[in-house]
Amino acid sequence: MPSWFRRSTLPAVAVATAAACALAGCSSGSGAPKPATGSSASSSSPSPSSSSTVRVPGGVELTDQGARLPFGRPASVVFESTRHRGTVLQLTVRRVQQGSLSDFKGFILDDAYKRRASYYYATVAVRNIGTGTVGGVPVPLWGVNATNTLLPAVDFTTRFARCPSATLPARFPPGASLSTCLVYLSPNRGALTSVSYRPSQQYNPITWTGDIAKPSGTEKPPPRKKPAPKRSG
């Protein structure tokens, strides 16, 4: 059966919570809360340090921390996959669509978290506009729900056709680009409110917001026009 690995949700304020879910193929039970600096968080959100030596190319203007962007507008950010490996990435959240439980037909939904979550698919673009080579790590974007909880993108162990996800290639050199789709699960059918670039707890996140498309097949059909009354002869 298709499966994905366990990923933990991290509250944006407390940066710790009980572990989230995964589909079949991961260990059972709930994991302990983990800080943002732990191995689980650092693997999916490398942090630019205060002593970063990443060079910003001439003509590239970094997006201010705390910026609130609409879907489709790019942000330019310093990104370090390790302490001595970094570059400048251009990140764009193009659009977000809400999914449905039926999209996961064939996956094992073996606990209430998975069955009672809300599912969201974010189409994103990444481009290396810096001078360094990075890669081999997840795209550094988180979902944020109505309870201000950071939601890591699901790490699939097989292809999910509804929203094909990919990490950055092992080598992602200057000029390289990637278009992918990220899946976020929000607990207890909570609503996704934004997508966020937040590489560390101290970083004032850059967020994208906009209209989120409803699940496919749920759109209401346009009202049928009533036929015009026949004229009497």
Image (cartoon, rainbow, N blue to C red):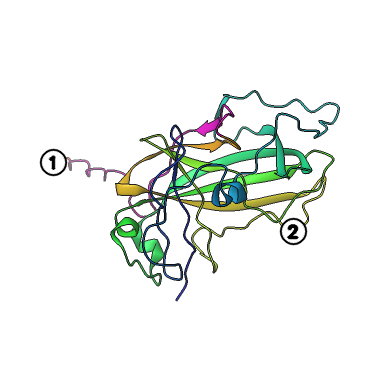
Check residue 226 for magenta coloring.
yes
Tags 2 and 1 in contact by the CB under 8 Å rule?
no
Return the residue at label 2: 170
* Residue corresponding to mark 1: 232
Q: Residue at x 40, y 69 (%)?
A: 107
Q: Quadrant of residue 192?
A: top left
Q: Does dot 2 land on a helix, a strand or a loop?
A: loop
* Screen quadrant of the N terminus: bottom left
Q: Nearer the viewer, residue 226 or 7?
A: 7
In the image: residue 54, left or right of residue 149: right
Residue 108 in the magenta stretch? The answer is no
Kind of residue at badge 1: Ser
Element carrying mark 1: loop
Q: Nearer the viewer, residue 179 or 30?
A: 30
Q: Position of residue 84 (x, y in %)?
A: 79, 43
Residue 190 in sight: yes
Please state which amino acid type lies under the numbered disc 2: Ala
Which residue sits at x=56%, y=60%? 164
For image coordinates 79% across by 28% down, the residue present is 60
Is 74 left, or right, of 174 in this rendering? left
Q: Range of the magenta residues?
A: 201-229
| Mark with earlier residue (2, 1) | 2
Q: Note whether 219 is above or below 129 in the view shown.
A: below
- The single residue placed furthest to the left in the displayed view is 232
From where the camera sits, is residue 221 visible? no
- The crowding category of the residue bearing disc 1, from other C-alpha atoms within 10 Å (few below 14, some 14 to 19, many at least 20), is few
Q: Position of residue 151 (x, y in %)?
A: 46, 45
Q: Disc 2 versus disc 1: distance between alpha carbons?
A: 76 Å
